[in-house]
Amino acid sequence: MSFLLELGIKVILMLAVVLTAALVTIYAELKAGSHMQTRIGPYYAGGKWGWAQPLADGAKFIQKEDLAPAKADRTVFGFAPYVVMMSTLAVFAVIPMGPDIVATNLDLGVYFILAISSLSVLGVLMAGWSSANKYSLIGGLRAAAQLIAYELPLVLAVVAVVVQAGTMSMNGIVEAQQATLFTIGGVEVALPYILSGQIIGFTIFMIAAVAELSRIPFDMPIAESELTMGYLTEYSGIRFTMFFLGEYASLVALSAIATTLYLGGYAVPFLPESMENFAGPGIFLIKVSFLVFLIIWIRWTWPRLREDQLQSMAWRWLIPLALFNIALISVFKVVL
Amino acid sequence: MSKNIDFPFPGLFKGMGLTLKAMFTKAPVTMYPDEKEIPVPRARGVISLDAEACTVCMLCARECPDWCIYIEGHKEAQEPAKPGGRIKTKNELDRFDIDYSLCMYCGICVEVCPFDALFWTPEYEYGEESISNLLHNQERLVDWLQTVPEPPALES
């Protein structure tokens, strides 16, 4: 197979999977959120349970006029949503859904993910600055400050996983989680990292991931009561759709990363290795949707932090805790 | 400074339990166009007019805070009660309109009417696509009279 053909197939498949997942996530958020608030949520779109609501919303957004403020920097303004979208989509290139179901098995997969997912803050800053709007600018700056503050605990939490696994490849990390940890009565038991020492790391990773997504309880960049819609204030039409879809795609992306790093990815204990290519994607999606639901659940329950509380939490608690976690894992790695 | 982060952990997780419970509880929602809510008998839905009782005294129109009642009338000569008696005049109602796009449902007109010509009825389905159609004319107001519930029994 020629390289270009392979690339094309991979890109199309990946887009189909990721965008569908993002739409399903939007629907889950609408539906779960309303039921948590004793509402019904979408009901009529699509005939049953309002399943077509995200599609209808998308169709509506596309019809809207694509406005840009008079003083906006049009090039940067137009480009920003795509930077956010691209950085999210690129993450999926290295996430394995089975031993062979992965776009590219990079040796530096974890490094690639951390590098590429930080690019989205660039898009957010571009959006905030180019909108020529005070709300957008402050929202963009808040997003940047938040991303810098929470990128560190995120990276440090991932470092502990890399130390324990001894590899930076995403496939390698999943395989490392299948290594026999101990044997009970001749049965070899392998546990995902969340159950074998990484529970602190997992907690830190999830907190930092929610902050990276700038969702409640860390949604200061788009805090409606103070900043209208933050860096999204001036966006409408297709560009707003891009941001919106990108936000949910990155929710799926971060859940997928957490699944791979902590929940054992496509593997479950006692599943024979020959089955993994077949059952892997299903197992992976179940784990991802569990994490996605957790993040949605948190969003509809918890109140928002204050800006200084957010910074204080990252710098005074999460980073020291993450460093302690690395030390702990390294000690265990050397001792055991 | 240490009070900056005062994490109420039990509270946060209690809240998560609450939302999870709410998610699996059936929402108490009336799916309006499919199933209809039955209003309480004395609900203030729309005001109906008993045109026979109206004497065009204009009290309701004058008391209305929104000035949404339009009344026109004329005087008519009435046959004297006894032959050769004095000719009396009677007020005849020509127009009685209520503009429900202005009405704020205070009910002052119903309270103030000395001849019991105005009644509340619990009907609420008279929404219109054009705001001008919310001006109910006399015929329509009289039609609402059929929906007036029985008055509550007098206290003995």
Image (tube, rainbow, N blue to C red):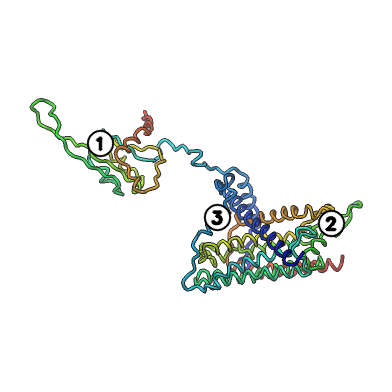
Cα–Cα gap, marks 2 and 3: 44 Å
Labelled disc at residue B54: 1
Given residues B156 and A245, the one toward you in this image is A245
Q: Residue at x 47, y 73 (%)?
A: A71
Report whether residue A204 is seen. no
Q: Secondary structure at mark 1?
A: loop
**Which quarter of the figure has residue A81?**
bottom right
Circle 3: residue type: Asp
Going from N to C along the chain, the mark reached first, 2 or 3, is: 3
Q: Is residue A334 above or below residue B37?
A: below
Cα–Cα gap, marks 1 and 3: 53 Å
Dot 1: chain letter: B
**Which quarter of the figure has residue A3?**
bottom right
- Left or right of A279 in this view: B16: left
Residue B132, percent from left and from top: 34, 48
- Left or right of B17 in this view: A200: right
Of all residues, the one furthest to the left in this rendering is B84
Residue B63, percent from left and from top: 27, 46
Of all residues, the one furthest to the right in this rendering is A186
Dot 2: chain letter: A
Circle 1: residue type: Cys
Circle 2: residue type: Ala
**Which quarter of the figure has residue A113?**
bottom right
Residue A283, percent from left and from top: 75, 53
Residue identifier under label 3: A57
Q: Are marks 2 and 3 in contact (CB under 8 Å)?
A: no
Residue identifier under label 2: A190
Of all residues, the one furthest to the front in this rendering is A2
